[in-house]
Image (tube, grey):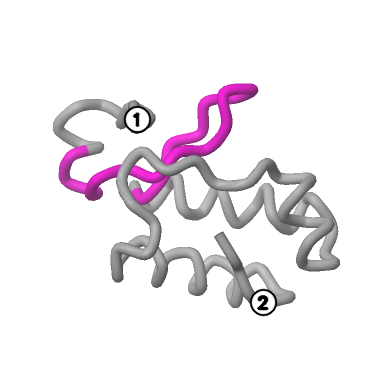
């Protein structure tokens, strides 16, 4: 996944768009916070906040050390109480 942006809003909007246009599929794991922060040249707290915002919007689910996974849809998250990682 190639995310773009330097601010919380820019990064959040970029990842949200990738989820909504299906560039990121349900079950896909997002990069670890530290890795994405280093790639973008931002503080890891910036990426952590981005992931929290996406989780509150129901687009991803954070699983601690298990990573952050893309959910199928906000409705599915509400109905299932979460989403499962994709099994390939």
Whether residue 56 sits left or right of residue 86 in the image: it is right
Q: How many marks?
A: 2
Residue span colored magenta: 59-76
Q: Mark 1 or mark 2: which comes first in sequence? A: 2
Vertical comparison of 88 with 14: above or below = above
Please identify the quadrant where the C terminus is shown.
top left
Question: Which residue is denoted by mark 1 in the rendering?
Answer: 88
Vertical comparison of 11 with 53: above or below = below
Question: Which residue is denoted by mark 2 in the rendering?
Answer: 5
Instruction: Examine the structure image and report whether residue 41 is included in the region drawn in magenta.
Output: no
Give me the residue at 14% from left, 32% from top: 79
Looking at the picture, how far across and down is residue 49, in whole percent? 65, 52
- SS under mark 1: loop
Give me the residue at 36% from left, 50% from top: 59
Please identify the quadrant where the N terminus is shown.
bottom right
Specify the farthest residue to the top. Answer: 65
Give neighbour class at mark 1: few <14, some 14-19, many 20+ (Cα, 10 Å): few
Specify the farthest residue to the front. Answer: 88
Which quadrant holds residue 67?
top right
Give me the residue at 33% from left, 51% from top: 25
Which is in the foreground here, disc 1 or disc 2?
Answer: 1
Marks 1 and 2 in Cβ contact (< 8 Å): no
Q: Nearer the viewer, residue 73 or 25?
A: 25
Instruction: Examine the structure image and report whether residue 72 is included in the region drawn in magenta.
Output: yes
């Amino acid at each position: 996944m190639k995310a773009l942006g330097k601010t919380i809003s820019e990064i959040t909007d970029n990842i949200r768009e990738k989820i909504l246009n299906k560039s990121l599929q349900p079950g896909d794991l997002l990069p670890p916070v530290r890795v994405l922060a280093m790639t973008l040249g931002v503080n890891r707290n910036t990426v952590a906040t981005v992931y929290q915002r996406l989780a509150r919007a129901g687009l991803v689910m954070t699983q601690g050390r298990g990573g952050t996974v893309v959910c199928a849809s906000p409705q599915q998250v509400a109905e299932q109480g979460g989403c499962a990682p994709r099994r390939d």
